[in-house]
Amino acid sequence: MQQYTPPNNQNLQAMLSNLNIAGLKNKIIFTFAMILVFRFCAQLPLFGIDATNFANLAATNNLIGFLDMFSGGALGNVSIIALGIGPYITASIIMQLLAVVIPKLEQLQKEEGEAGRRKLSQYTRVFTIVIAALQAIVFVVYLLKTARAAIMPDVSIPAFAIGSVVIMTAGSAFTMWLAELMTERGIGNGASMLIFCGIISKIPFYASQTATLVRGNSSLQPMLALLLLIFFIIMVAIVIMHEAARKVIIINPRRQVGNKIYGGSNTYIPFKLNPGGVMPIIFAIAILLFPTTIIQIFTSGSFQEGPLGEFMLHLAHALNPSGFIYNAVYFVLIVALTFFYASIIPNLQPKEIANNLKKYGSSIPGIKPGKPTAEALDRILSKTTFIGAFALGIIALCPAIACSVTGITTLHGIGATSLIIMVGVALDFLNQVRTNLLPKNYESFLKQ
């Protein structure tokens, strides 16, 4: 009788040993530890807030629900980090725009190396505090004018207002610190990871709402299957667009050093169809959220009176996240920000690439070195970015249209915005893991 032998566990051991390469295991543990800290802080409410009453008020407000999804539930709980990572993202956008316009900031970014980038980061942090303070004031005014029932009756209003602004500003600074720590010592982009976790945390809520809706109306069951199929197709399209790239072949010259010949092999430069990844989506949301938050204050309470109140009511209706104008502006912002992000990525500058190719004697087949190469690369980058920007904008609108057509609006919160961010962040996370595993692959190759 043949004796049973347990399955070979060499693959498992190899996988576990790979996690220790370049501190990958410690980076993953650190990333998830910071996420747990963020989720814990999201459950700590501000002093003087009745979270139950605010949750009831927020349930009827689409804007608060939309903002809450990107704050990881922190806004819905009126927690100490209710502003989330939004102020930091907004400050980053503005600093990147200013770096293009102001020559001194551009010099810091491009010519002064690591010291210049550290100084720009410091400017971004200071600007984040300013934006967080402004947003905290706006939110406190909203609570006092519109959601007064969410404030406990025995709380001193001046003390509550001043304390809330200070605590929420400090909470935003703490969230920024967590994001930067995750980027530096963990895996992936910290800000994107926090937004990713916020979206994931809201999925059970939307799933529960959808299940209740479908159970109450059996005719919606085929529509739910169709909607989930559309979501799946959109996710596949997001993956394809995220990984697609236009490869430009580069011919490298042969060089003889002593008795050995180096180079001579062809390589390529990948121009990604979506060079900005999830950042254009996040930037577009950040740009839209701030004015819509301010408008929200003028759409209820005493601000409704007078011509200004009526104008704000019309503007709030026009900028409703499910409205046509909002989606049109959203589409234009995504397209514009994709082009903008492609123009500021250091390794996608046609002139610099052409100069480096000429310096090392490399060339593109059929194109002369120097200025003709730069022009050819600029045309290629423009075409790929144009296709990617419009594809990203169209994908961003598809789920909202699908929800309206099928009549299942409970999944509107998990639209293309959330899908693109979730898929994009997950793919970036996997790419970061592969990058950290490359030293192990090279080491095993050299030992063969």
Image: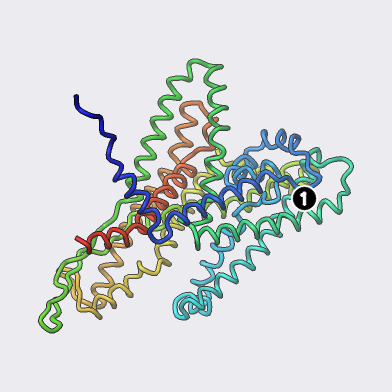
Counting from the top left corner in percent of width and height, residue 58 is at 68, 37
Which residue does the image show at 48% across and 16% down from the upper left? 219
Which one is nearer the viewer's eye here, 190 or 28? 28
User: How dense is the environment of label 1, judged by Cα within 10 Å: few (below 14), some, or many (20 and up)?
Assistant: some
Q: Quadrant of the N terminus?
A: top left
Task: Identify whether 38 is placed above or below 223.
Answer: below
Task: Identify whether 140 is placed above or below 256.
Answer: above
Task: Identify whether 251 is placed above or below 214.
Answer: below
Which one is nearer the viewer's eye here, 127 or 171? 171
Which residue does the image show at 77% across and 50% down from the upper left? 141
Determine if residue 133 is in view.
yes
Judge left or right: residue 78 versus residue 446: right
Kindly identify which residue carries mark 1.
Answer: 141
Circle 1 SS class: helix
Q: Quadrant of the C terminus?
A: bottom left
Which one is nearer the viewer's eye here, 297 or 154? 154
User: Residue pushed farthest bottom?
Assistant: 258
User: Residue pushed farthest front?
Assistant: 1
Which residue does the image show at 53% across and 16% down from the upper left? 217
Counting from the top left corner in percent of width and height, residue 372 is at 23, 74
Counting from the top left corner in percent of width and height, residue 349 is at 35, 70
